[in-house]
């Protein structure tokens, strides 16, 4: 029964949110965020601890702003499938230098690895990529219940991206992603939280955590350019900056993967420090 209610809740979110006028939906979602802040439940407490790791002297209003930003992500995610290509392009902006680098990399035909933390609206970033007619693939965590996972797959496929499951697929995800890079795809991966329990240990905001080694492995083994993406909300959309990560070329593979993943962690930290309210990390992260 609980799984069925969860499935129906997400389905209703996608349907009802698109029916509401945007101004009404914004008030509803912000009110929900403020209510969560007032109740101070486990997710809010975890967000507070994570943000305190980022900014020890933070005002508690940063937690409220973080919840409002997270609510905005869900509001926009529920409305994205009904938007046009023109709206995808208008609602997302990339700094000109970053755009030039990405455009050149995609034109070269060797693919590109874009690794990003849970900042602002990463689905809007993906919709912007595919709206440039660049093929894109990503990996999705296999959520429970299965029906909810399938809803998220269908949602992202409707935005124009290919989605492969993190677990339970016919082939290993890294094999598929390496193949797509050779075909000239943009591979977009959330990289600030390890879901496999076998990630690479890194230093992050003065503490130890693990992050997935996939982005580093793909860049090292295929030669595709690797970028850390920094996202943040603006009053009217989402903005982005890319930070180039150049893996070391000498040494054992595991040493190179660890060094590259640490460079990614440092790049994530730089972006999160600038826009901590837009970092949607409500799960345990540090070891």
Image: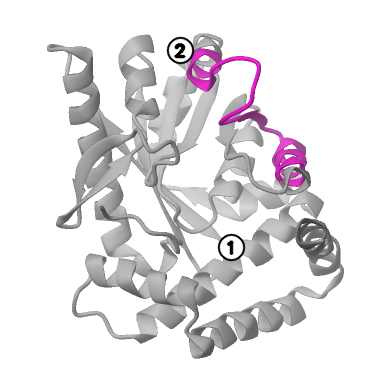
Residue at (58, 87) in percent of width and height = 35
Let me know if residue 25 is in the magenta part: no
Give the answer, above or below, for where 93 lies relative to 45.
Answer: above
Residue at (68, 84) in percent of width and height = 27
- Give the alpha-carbon distance from disc 2 to disc 1, as whole Å: 31 Å
Q: Earlier in the sequence, mark 2 or mark 1?
A: 1
**The quarter of the displayed image where residue 232 is located:** bottom left
- Answer yes or no: is residue 154 visible: yes
Which range is magenta? 149-177
Other-residue count near label 2 (Cα within 10 Å), few / some / many at <14 / 14–19 / ≥20: some
Give the answer, above or below, for where 33 lies relative to 8.
Answer: below
- Left or right of 183? Residue 220 is left
Let me know if residue 160 is in the magenta part: yes
SS under mark 2: loop
Could you tell me residue 197's position as x and y percent?
38, 38
SS under mark 1: helix
- Left or right of 252? Residue 126 is right
Q: Indicate which disc residue 73 carries.
A: 1
Identify residue for label 2.
110
Could you tell me residue 22's position as x and y percent?
75, 73
- Left or right of 57? Residue 178 is right
- Left or right of 138? Residue 192 is left
Give the answer, above or below, for where 106 lies relative to 266.
Answer: above
**The quarter of the displayed image where residue 133 is located:** top right
């Amino acid at each position: 029964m609980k799984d069925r209610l969860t499935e129906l809740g997400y389905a209703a979110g996608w349907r009802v949110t698109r029916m509401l006028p945007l101004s009404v939906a914004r008030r509803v979602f912000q009110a929900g965020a403020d209510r969560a802040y007032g109740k101070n439940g486990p997710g809010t407490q975890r967000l507070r601890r994570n943000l305190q790791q980022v900014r020890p002297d933070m005002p508690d209003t940063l937690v409220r702003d973080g919840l409002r930003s997270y609510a905005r992500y869900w509001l926009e995610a529920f409305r994205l499938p009904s938007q046009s290509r023109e709206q995808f392009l208008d609602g997302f902006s990339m700094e000109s230098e970053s755009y030039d680098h990405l455009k050149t990399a995609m034109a070269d035909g060797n693919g590109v690895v874009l690794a990003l933390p849970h900042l602002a609206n990463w689905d809007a970033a993906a919709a912007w990529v595919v709206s440039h007619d660049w093929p894109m693939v990503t990996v999705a965590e296999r959520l429970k219940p299965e029906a909810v996972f399938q809803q998220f797959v269908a949602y992202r496929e409707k935005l124009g991206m290919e989605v492969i499951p993190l677990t339970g697929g016919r082939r290993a995800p890294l094999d598929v992603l390496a193949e797509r890079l050779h075909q000239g795809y943009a591979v977009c991966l959330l990289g600030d939280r390890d879901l496999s329990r076998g990630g690479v240990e890194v230093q992050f905001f003065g503490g130890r955590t693990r992050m997935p080694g996939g982005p580093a492995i793909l860049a090292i083994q295929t030669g595709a350019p690797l970028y850390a993406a920094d996202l943040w909300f603006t009053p009217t959309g989402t903005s982005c900056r890319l930070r180039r990560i150049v893996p070391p070329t000498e040494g054992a593979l595991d040493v190179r993967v660890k060094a590259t993943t640490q460079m990614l962690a440092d790049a994530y930290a730089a972006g999160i420090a600038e826009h901590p309210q837009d970092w949607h990390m409500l799960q345990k992260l540090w070891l």
